[in-house]
């Protein structure tokens, strides 16, 4: 596969404009984020994956974070659930395995 090559000029503020071919290939548009990684003498540029693509989920998680910080609406897990989680920790899980018993949704 032939690589895509582009050249950018560094401004006095340390800014660059990613060439259009690079932006298109990475799928980055206005407001998008890119990540830089230095490997030896090369800089690798990748599209930074946003933590939350869905604004509703992002808003919910921000609200949840605020509640956790202030201690509002947050309580301990039921003891039975905490014990079951600890008992299951570190055990292999087969997601294709049939579920035994009734399941309530």
Image (spheres, grey):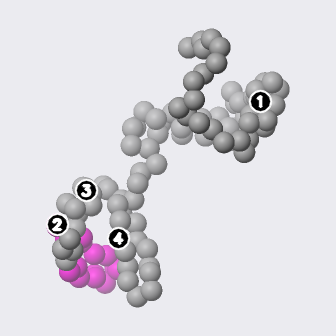
Q: Secondary structure at mark 1?
A: helix
Dot 4: within a 10 Å radius of its alpha carbon, few (fewer than 14), some, or many (20 or more) residues? some
Residue, x 42% and y 33% (percent of image)? 56
Residue toward you, 61 or 2 = 2
Whole-number angstrom distance, CA of label 1 to CA of label 2: 52 Å
The residue range painted magenta reads: 7-21
Q: Position of residue 48 (x, y in %)?
A: 39, 59
In the rendered image, which residue does mark 4 sit on? 45
Task: Give the mark toward the camera: 3 or 1.
Answer: 1
Q: Are marks 4 and 3 in contact (CB under 8 Å)?
A: no
Disc sitting over residue 20 in the figure: 2
Whole-number angstrom distance, CA of label 2 to CA of label 4: 14 Å
Asked if residue 55 lies left or right of residue 105, the reply is: left
Q: Say whether disc 3 or disc 2 marks the residue closer to the N-terminus.
A: 2
Disc sitting over residue 84 in the figure: 1
Q: Say whether disc 3 or disc 1 marks the residue closer to the N-terminus.
A: 3
From the image, which quarter does the N terminus lie in?
A: bottom left
Q: Position of residue 2 (x, y in %)?
A: 18, 74
Residue, x 79% and y 35% (percent of image)? 87
Q: Secondary structure at mark 3?
A: loop
Whole-number angstrom distance, CA of label 4 to CA of label 3: 12 Å
Dot 3: within a 10 Å radius of its alpha carbon, few (fewer than 14), some, or many (20 or more) residues? few
Task: Give the mark toward the camera: 1 or 4.
Answer: 1
**Quadrant of the rendered structure where residue 42 is?**
bottom left
Residue, x 46% and y 39% (percent of image)? 58
Disc sitting over residue 27 in the figure: 3
Q: Is 42 drawn above or below residue 29 in the view shown?
A: below
The count of marks equals: 4
Q: Secondary structure at mark 4?
A: strand
């Amino acid at each position: 596969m032939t690589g895509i090559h582009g050249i950018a000029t560094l401004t006095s503020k340390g800014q660059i404009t990613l060439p259009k071919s690079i932006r298109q290939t990475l799928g980055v548009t206005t407001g998008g984020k890119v990540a830089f990684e230095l490997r030896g003498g090369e800089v690798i540029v990748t599209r930074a994956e946003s933590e939350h693509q869905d604004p509703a989920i992002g808003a919910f998680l921000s609200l949840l974070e605020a509640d956790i910080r202030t201690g509002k609406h947050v309580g301990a897990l039921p003891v039975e659930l905490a014990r079951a989680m600890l008992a299951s920790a570190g055990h292999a899980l087969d997601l294709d395995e049939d579920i035994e018993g009734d399941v309530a949704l």
